Image (spheres, rainbow, N blue to C red):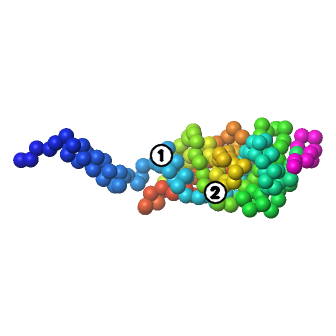
Amino acid sequence: MAIMTPRGLLCAVFGLCVASLACGDKTQFNEDVARNILQSNAVKLEGEVVTITSMQVDCGVESELWDAPSQVSGNRSTARLTPKGRELNFDDDPTMESNFRQPHASVRGTFSLEVGDISDIRNGETAGTRLVNAKTGIRIQHACFPNSLPIMGVKHGDFREDTPVSFLFRQAEDGWHLEKLVH
């Protein structure tokens, strides 16, 4: 009978751990699974609203992504979007309003996501679905946006800066998949 050395034992344990990960339970759903799915594939967004900082608005003016903001009404200013801004998948003029802490803009296109805090995971309305609420941002490849731009969640039909985004996941034979962003 062969005696296993500590190094051999460590290698055997490590090998079993790696093998068990490869054969993982595809039915399991948790924060790590949700985060991995959201961050590993680009996601198509249609008219979602992201917050931008005042410094990013100024940088966008300097980079000719939009014009300098002008006042539209007593509590609302907008910066007219240019073709360069549309090329980055901004879909509407950046807007500054008194009822929002930061400027915001609408985006449309396919984006890589960055997931922050996952605040809730619960069963969906149908079997094999999960709803995930998470603070999530989009990545835009431009010097004005070195950090992800937070997506506003929707609460009572209105976009809100302090509301996480809700995602619907569906289980298939090969594991969990993102179905859509829900409002």
33 shown above or below 173: above
The disc placed on residue 32 is 1
Q: Position of residue 172 (x, y in %)?
A: 46, 60
Instruction: Tell me, yes or no, if residue 61 can be seen here.
Output: yes
Q: Position of residue 21 (x, y in %)?
A: 35, 51
10 Å crowding of disc 2: few (<14), some (14-19), many (20+) = some
The disc placed on residue 111 is 2
Q: Nearer the viewer, mark 1 or mark 2?
A: 2
Secondary structure under badge 1? helix
Between residues 158 and 107, which one lies in front from this camera angle? 107
Q: Decide: marks 1, 2 in contact (CB < 8 A)?
A: no
Q: Is residue 169 left or right of residue 23?
A: right
10 Å crowding of disc 1: few (<14), some (14-19), many (20+) = few
Furthest-left residue in view?
1
Q: Residue at x 61, y 58 (%)?
A: 43
Q: Which residues are magenta?
A: 68-76
Secondary structure under badge 2? strand
The disc placed on residue 43 is none
Q: Residue at x 72, y 40 (%)?
A: 161
Cα gap from disc 1 to disc 2, whole angstroms:
20 Å
Q: Amino acid at mark 2?
A: Phe
Between residues 30 and 7, which one lies in front from this camera angle? 7
Q: Position of residue 135 (x, y in %)?
A: 62, 42
Task: Look at the image and say whether residue 73 sits in the magenta stretch.
Answer: yes
Between residues 5 and 125, which one lies in front from this camera angle? 5
Q: Is residue 140 left or right of residue 67?
A: left
